[in-house]
Image: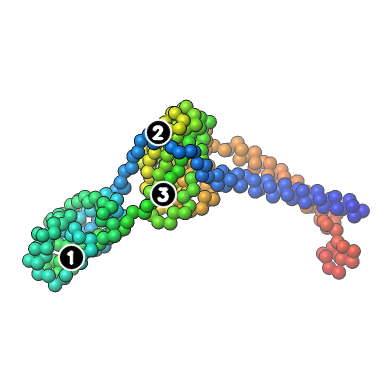
Amino acid sequence: MSRRRTLRRGAVASLITAVLILAVVLPLAAPIARAERAGQEMGRPHVASVSAAAPHVNVTITTNGTPAFVPDVLHVTAGQNLTITLNNSGAYNHTFTMASNGTEVLPLNWSPAQLDDYFATNPPIVNASMPANSVTDVNLTVNASMAGGDFEFVSLIPYQFQAGLYGFLDVTPPVSSSLTFYVNASDTYRFLPDALNASSVTKFPVAINVFFGTVGVLSHTFTLSPLPNYNLSSSNYTTFFGQHAPLVSIPVPTTAGTYNNGTVVITAPGYYEYICTITGHFANGMFGFLYVGIPTVVPYVAVVSTAIVQSEILIGGGVLLAIGLVLALAATVTGRVPPPKPGQDKFGHY
Ligand SMILES: [Cu+2]
């Protein structure tokens, strides 16, 4: 066999190998490439409306027979609406009385009268009674001016504070975010862009602003799933959003160049899917992903039906694999590719 022919056979085998690799890699790479597409800015928005809801946080403080609030430190972020459930399962009455000064620590050697005097001159921001065997809810708006403070709460029943019935509300500043995205809807059922990159976020909760406009004339919505790392299904998203309220659902203006906007508060890293909820639009490909605190390349499964494409890829890949196996078998019969150099045996040894 001439060296020239052997080389050509080697080239054919290399080509087949390359095709095999592409057959495997391309279907994997396609969704990643789509996920990476990000950040087209769409001109300066004309703001049509502004809406932002303060997030709501529920916490529970319990007391039982022992003189302690459990937990005795609450961590909240300024800008949150707080509901504190006071659960006293013990046989003693208490109060839940919170100082308005976020920098003061009340001396434990104060007498009950001194404690009462203090709150008479410095009115508490919360003062609720906790009767024995009761559950009481109190609401507190933790506004921005409280950021950085540690607000002490005590029981004013004589000698309970001194015995240990105290704790602190620790208020951290809100994470200010300059993250603003512009997303446009197209009448070909696409979001432009369909990937929003908030990978740089490291602190939570984080507020992200989304401006939503259109390049078409049809009605659309920008509706964001509240669950991280969850892929919506085009067949049951209505049920899903009935059970899990969207973080935001913005109707698009139907005039190009005008925008509606909304602020979403994200509390955990992950990818969050957004879809258009107008019937049929999601199924036609109107979805995208917001990546918060994670790289924009994450494995996800597009739930919009790709069954036909996938089976074609599987069959095609199988055929190519079979060709490759036949060629490999042929090579083992007819000899090594490429052939050994002069003086080498077929294993490359001299
Ligand atoms: Cu739509």
* Residue 303 coordinates in the image, percent (x, y): 51, 40
SS assignment at label 2: strand
Nearer the observer, 226 or 42: 42
Q: Residue at x 43, y 33 (%)?
A: 258
Circles 3, 2 touching at the beta carbon (< 8 Å): no
- Label of residue 246 in the image: none
Check disc 1 and report the residue beneath it: 165
Tell me the kind of residue under disc 3: Ser
Label 3 to label 2: alpha-carbon separation: 23 Å
How many C-alpha atoms fall within 10 Å of the one at disc 3: few (<14), some, or many (≥20)? few
- Marked residue nearer the N-terminal end (1 or 2): 1
Check disc 3 and report the residue beneath it: 178
Check disc 2 and report the residue beneath it: 251
* Residue 165 coordinates in the image, percent (x, y): 17, 65
SS assignment at label 1: loop
What coloring was used for the rendering?
Answer: rainbow
Nearer the observer, 38 or 249: 38
Location of residue 349 by image quarter: bottom right
* Residue 298 coordinates in the image, percent (x, y): 53, 50
Location of residue 33 by image quarter: top right
Q: Quadrant of the C terminus?
A: bottom right
Tell me the kind of residue under disc 2: Pro
Tell me the kind of residue under disc 1: Leu
Q: Is mark 2 within 8 Å of ligand 1?
A: no
